Image (spheres, helix red, strand yellow):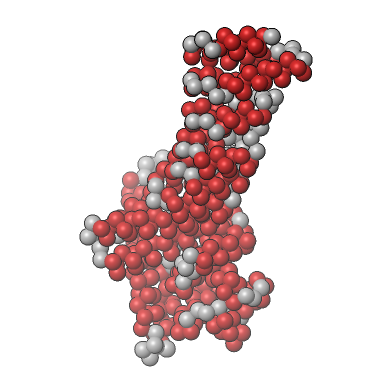
Amino acid sequence: MIVRHFLTWAQTASAAQRAEGAGDMARTYLYGDLDTAERRQVEIALMSLAEDPSPLVRRALADNFASAIDAPRALVSALACDQSAIAGPVLSRSPLLSEAELVDCVAIGDATAQTAIALRARVPHGVCAALAEIGARDACVALAVNPGADILDFSLRRMVARFGDDGDMREALLSRPALPASVRSALVGAVAESLSAFVINCGWLSHERADRLLREERDKANVLIVTEAAEYDGRQGVRELVAHLRACGHLTSSLVLRALLSGNRDLFEASLVELSGLNDDKVAALIDDFRGAGFAAAYLRAGLPEKFLPAFRAALSAQREYGHVGSPDPRLSLVMVERVITACESMNEGQLDMLLALLRRFEREAALEEARAETARITQEATAPDVAPPTTFSGVTASGPLIDLVAFEAELMAA
């Protein structure tokens, strides 16, 4: 009887009155002492209000039922498909919406509705995949900063592929803890390509020079990422990164040689495993005996350039002599580069000219880095206070090194 009176009254009440009445009816359903028949009648009344022409009424329903576990299931589903101003609270909080329903709402919703879904306390990986594939830019940024989002690696890379040139997107992704190495590499590639296109369009660099600069800066960043992956994710992290680099065409002989000349053997070892199909232990043993025929066979089986073989052997020899460099900011070792240049020049009869040109570029880069480091050290010593600073600091430390994309952009622009 009460429900009948309510529906009759709603025919002539104003929108504001109906919205207030809808809120009262919703609270009665959730918290009132109703028997089964009365509860069913109230539910029918609420469903009729879900089609009320006034958004105020439907929003009142959404606000009251957004977080309710006992809300009418059909009503919640109807509100979730309403306009985003009404659906937002339900999409962002309702525990009744299934993963399949959320994916469907991503497909039909606008940026506001998608953002509400992206900011849920827990976002399943299927919903994350849908947002990464078709979500608006704002929704993807919101998803990236949400610690409750279960975003798989391929979805992260898809977000980079779609919005990698957006600074907010990169910052949001880099704020995620334990960001996979393959995603960091994809971010670096997106920044490099965006800046390369910018300087070419401005006429500051030729296509050829910009392409070379793009490759070199990307390779430098990937060597750093490999070092981080080895430190935090172990051998599996390096293997996954190498597989990603191979898939996107960035696993080049110059990158692998650069890693060796930076004192990092992990990338070379993982690359031989990935390209040759041999297991980890077999490849490690062959690299230890890098002067043997077995190493040469594995090297050629991996498809690496035969004319580069002397350089790789000289690099491994220099690495054995000067030790494995494992700093979190690996740079080309000038002494190792010079050692490889000397070895290649002694056997060059014209076939190694291109290789020597690459090594000379490595030598120039290493010498410049060494000069910068020495200049900074001398300047710091000259301006250092007489009182030595404390040797320890009890403040909060970072969880691990991250790629500084701002510095990367600045370096690329300066070049």
Q: Is residue 172 above or below residue 187?
A: above
Q: Is residue 32 left or right of residue 322?
A: right
> Going 50% across and 79% down the picture, which residue do you hit?
304
* Residue 59 horizontal/vertical position (percent): 52, 22
* Residue 109 horizontal/vertical position (percent): 50, 38
Q: Which of the image's four quarters has the C terminus?
A: bottom left
Farthest residue to the left: give it.
Answer: 203
Q: Is residue 85 above or below residue 282?
A: above
* Residue 129 horizontal/vertical position (percent): 56, 48
> Going 61% across and 10% down the picture, which residue do you hit?
6
Q: Is residue 366 above or below residue 1?
A: below
Q: Is residue 31 left or right of residue 328?
A: right
Q: Which of the image's four quarters has the N terminus?
A: top right
Which quadrant holds residue 243?
A: bottom right
Of the pair 41 and 388, the residue shown nearer to us: 41
> Going 67% across and 24% down the picture, which residue do you hit?
71
* Residue 83 horizontal/vertical position (percent): 49, 30
Of the pair 331 and 197, the residue shown nearer to us: 197
